[in-house]
Image: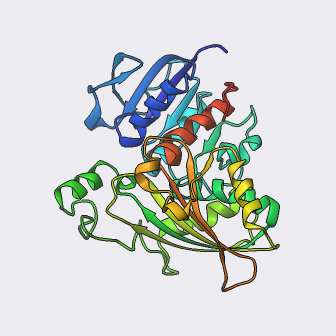
Amino acid sequence: MKNLNVAVVGASGLVGRKILEILEERKFPVGEFFPFASAKSKGKEISFRGESFVIDELTEDSFKGKDIDIALFAAGGSVSEKYIPLFIEEGIKVVDNSSFYRMADGVPLVIPEVNGSIITEKDMLIANPNCSTIQSVLALKPIYDKYGIDRIVYNTYQAVSGGGELALEDLYNKTNKKWKYKIANNVLAQIDVFEDNGYTKEEMKMVNETRKILEDPSLKITATAVRVPVENSHGVSCNLSLKNPFDLDELRKDLENFPGIKVVDDIKEEIYPIPTMATGTDDVYVGRIRKDESIENGLNIWIIADNIRKGAATNAVMNAEILMGVNNDF
């Protein structure tokens, strides 16, 4: 595989820096490397593969003439909206971590282990799903395929790192510069803005993205997204109504055999997924697997994953590997 010239947009942020780590860890064949960020990060140095690189300000001209093969965007929706079309005009392929293009017609929304096969060499843009969607749908995929799912009830317990550097400072310093209320010693039943239907934008992301990834627009889904005072790694409680009967032991094996899932479920020893178990890893941890005895074919599962790694950076790099034909096992 020839080396590829790679740009990372938003290279100075939490996800951007993690993308650099993952590119290095997974030995992505980077030739020339170009870090971009906003004006406030211009001139700062960033380390990649043992070398120091000076961050360039992203402008309409700063990326041109550099023979970039692929760009990984981790800079927010407004940046993606403005610059991704310009990158594509230059023949640069893009993996976007923002929400801007996720629901756009013709743009693949991809979790590699779930639907990576839909990516083709002709694609110029791949959208990375929402962090909570990634870990949830990866865990649901083997269940959906084998038993069918009639309804999903999501309740999320999302870590502060999902809100970026300022949110983490609020957690550490017990301030509220990022959100209306302090997150330290608190639980916030709001992630992103409220929409007209009373749901937050984050909740509707999970609803709509799940349907798109599973290619099931009629799937019944509801969600409540909550921010909790945990530094890193999101939790999601999924209550499911399946279309067909299931045996718990068999379903557990179905999960164990699916790529990217690690079953951690030993209630006799009080062992189940927790955020500190997932942080720093790329697995999606599933436990508390049990029947919902209040409905027919009901199931409860508990899911934990590192939202900065698997929920963003690792998923993006894996998508880039598929898009660029890099051979890496999942």
Residue at (77, 60) in percent of width and height: 250
Quadrant of the image occupied by residue 55: top left
Residue at (69, 25) in percent of width and height: 327
Outermost residue, front side = 268
Q: Is residue 85 visible?
A: no
Instruction: Please tell me how many numbered marks the rendered image carries.
Output: 0
| Left or right of 133 on screen, residue 291 | right
| Left or right of 50 on screen, residue 93 | right
Q: Position of residue 135 (x, y in %)?
A: 57, 54
Q: Is residue 189 above or below residue 16?
A: below
Quarter occupied by the C terminus: top right
Front one among 250 and 150 = 250
Residue at (70, 84) in percent of width and height: 295
Quadrant of the image occupied by residue 315: top right
Residue at (58, 59) in percent of width and height: 265
Q: Tell me, what colour scheme is on the image?
A: rainbow
| Left or right of 155 on screen, residue 182 | left
Front one among 161 and 330 = 330
Q: Position of residue 16 (x, y in %)?
A: 41, 37
Q: Is residue 46 above or below residue 228?
A: above
Q: Is residue 287 above or below residue 25?
A: below
Front one among 277 and 260 = 277
Quarter occupied by the N terminus: top right
Q: Is residue 130 above or below residue 90?
A: below
Q: Is residue 61 visible?
A: yes
Q: Position of residue 277 (x, y in %)?
A: 45, 49
